[in-house]
Image (cartoon, grey):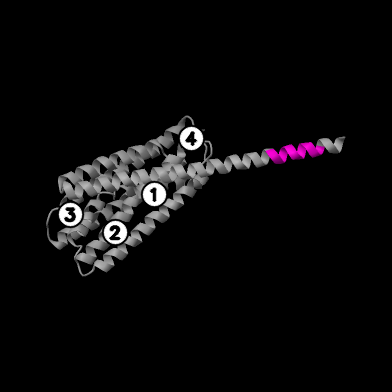
Amino acid sequence: MVEGKVRVNRRDKTSSTSLWYRVMKTMQKALTGKVAGVQFAFYLVMLLGSFACTLLLPGLGAVVWSLAAGVVLLALFIAWWPFKTSNAAGGDLVVEWIGRIVAGIAGLISLVFAAMQLHSLLTPSAFGERERRLLSWAAVVVVLVTVLVIIGFVLQMTRRERTHLIRSLSESIFGSVACVAAGGWPFFAFLMRMLADGYQSRRATALVMVIVLALVILVAIGVAATLWWRDIRADEPGSWFGVAMLPVMFAGIAFYLLSVSVFYLLF
């Protein structure tokens, strides 16, 4: 009789464990699809918008679109911050929001500076002037990231609960760097202009290779993002949306580096 009860209990535990495993796998597949869908939607809007404004509304139109789209991107990322802590309260919650706001401000500075350089880059000028404009954004990024690392460390030291300090610091810096990287999206317009003007260049093969490499990098980052959500705390509602935006944010750096490569190939 006792053995029968034990056998039944084991069967119940096994079935419940199996059911929980199936539920988790189903949620994992659904969430992975949602992450990929959000990425695709953002890429579609950002790329098509930049492409249309650059070719149809050259000059100021591309700059305005880059600024507007970049601000929306930053606002959504700050609102759906992927590294938020739901159990944070009091001073710790204030510290978390200060970090998010600082990251947003740094991203806005990066974006505005890139848009200013874009306006100059789309205007015909000498090689040296364009080169200076193009490379100056990288210097701004280095300064911003350095400042963000210092601020992030100070903010972590002000937390009352300093559990998982290294992880919290790395997540804070990672999110802040993503905001700064998003400022590179305006350079996609400059990239489109260079490709449109230099498609008959003798270096066309090299251009194609660079573009293919960039696409591979973007796809790799996107695939990685579908796995990053597993490291996000399970009790964080909406964190998957912020994780899905991470590759889109870092795509700004990819387009900037691609612009620099194409610039030196063509000129």
Horizontal side, residue 165 vs residue 97: left or right = right
Mark 2, secondary structure of its residue? helix
Above or below, 122 against 8 in this view is: below
Label 1 and label 2: CA atoms lie apart by 16 Å
- Label 3, residues with CA under 10 Å away: few <14, some 14-19, many ≥20: many
Mark 3 or mark 4: whose residue is earlier in sequence: 3
Nearer to the camera, 124 or 14: 14
Based on the picture, tell me whether residue 196 belongs to the magenta stretch: no
Mark toward the viewer: 3 or 1? 1
Label 4 and label 2: CA atoms lie apart by 35 Å
Which residue lies under the disc numbered 2?
258
* Quarter holding residue 6: top right
Horizontal side, residue 86 vs residue 111: left or right = right
Q: Position of residue 82 (x, y in %)?
A: 44, 41
Q: Which mark is residue 172?
A: none
Q: Position of residue 69 (x, y in %)?
A: 27, 41
Above or below, 209 against 147 in this view is: below
Q: Which mark is residue 237?
A: 4
Q: Which amino acid does the dot numbered 3 rest on?
A: Leu
Mark 1 or mark 4: whose residue is earlier in sequence: 4
Mark 1 or mark 2: whose residue is earlier in sequence: 1
**Stretch in magenta:** 6-15
**Residue sticking out furthest to the right:** 1
Nearer to the camera, 13 or 254: 13
Label 3 and label 4: CA atoms lie apart by 42 Å
Q: Which amino acid does the dot numbered 1 rest on?
A: Pro
Mark 1, secondary structure of its residue? helix
Mark 4 or mark 2: whose residue is earlier in sequence: 4
Based on the picture, tell me whether residue 13 belongs to the magenta stretch: yes
